[in-house]
Amino acid sequence: MDSVNKTLYIPLYGKAFVSRKGLFLQDESAERIWQAQGFPLKGKAASKWLAYNMGMRAAVFDRWTAEKLEENPGAVVLHIGCGLDSRVERVAHKGHLWFDVDFPEVIAERKNHFSENGEDHMLGADVRQPEWLEAVPDGQPAIVVMEGISMYLQLAELRELMGRLNRRFGPVQLLMDTYTVFAAKASRYKNPINDVGVTQVYGIDSPEELTGDTGFRFVRERELTPEDLIARLPRREQRFFRTMFAGKLAKKIYRLYEYKA
């Protein structure tokens, strides 16, 4: 895998770590895959604090996905940039088609650990290209999960992708985490993804940068580190986590936006 694709091992480690500790989510697949495939992480990528943050982020996306599945019977789910994530197992989705989407080499690896069936499918594709959407039934409601991917797409690429989703489905619910422009610039010098070779990422400073002719409207900013999940951390660690990952400093770096088309 190239350096961008290797970044999938950072959240995988985080989910395996918190699952072993009984925090935020139960993810036996992450534990199993990390034990079999994981490699020594270094620097901040191996930090327990980052692992907490990755596990909490996954739990927040899980909650949102489950909420939207209940609100939109029959909607198709697109998990774009799925990596080796097992959300398809963690979130009950009976009656919904689910498509895990990532680069072909990532999906090839994913198929060593997950299987397809009548509802669960895997698509190997570069989502910057339009052809992959032809494999997904159109004209129906869609729930789009984009966790940890927007920062690897330039603004124009991200807008083009959203425009295609809007034209293909209707209505569309979308949840996406983003870097700020400041965070993207700083990431060249200090970011856990540097430890797997990534130095170029992108950010946005306003959620409205992704509205307009994409057909999407901004719904609201969601909380990446909700208090009820922070409260599950060991008490002696909660204050530090709030300061570094849930306070004003974190907001300057990282945001979570919900859109609808």
Image: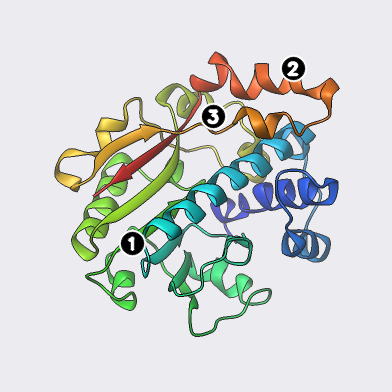
How far apart, in angstroms, are the residues tagged by discs 2 and 1?
A: 38 Å
Q: Secondary structure at mark 3?
A: loop
Residue 84 visible at all = no
Amino acid bearing label 2: Arg
Q: Is residue 215 left or right of residue 181?
A: left
Of residue 207 and residue 111, the one placed in the foreground of this image is 207
Q: Nearer the viewer, mark 1 or mark 3?
A: 1
Residue 92 position (above or below residue 255): below
Earlier in the chain: of badge 1 and badge 3, it is 1
Q: Any mark on residue 142, and which?
A: 1
Position of residue 182 measured from the top left corner of the image (x, y, whole percent): 45, 21
Position of residue 12 measured from the top left corner of the image (x, y, whole percent): 69, 53
Location of residue 222 by image quarter: top left
Q: Secondary structure at mark 2?
A: helix
Position of residue 59 measured from the top left corner of the image (x, y, whole percent): 62, 46
Q: Secondary structure at mark 1?
A: strand
Q: Is residue 80 left or right of residue 15?
A: left
Q: Any mark on residue 217, and which?
A: none
Residue lying farthest bottom? 118
Seen at 60% across and 47% down, the residue is 58
Position of residue 31 measured from the top left corner of the image (x, y, whole percent): 79, 59
Residue 184 position (above or below residue 55): above
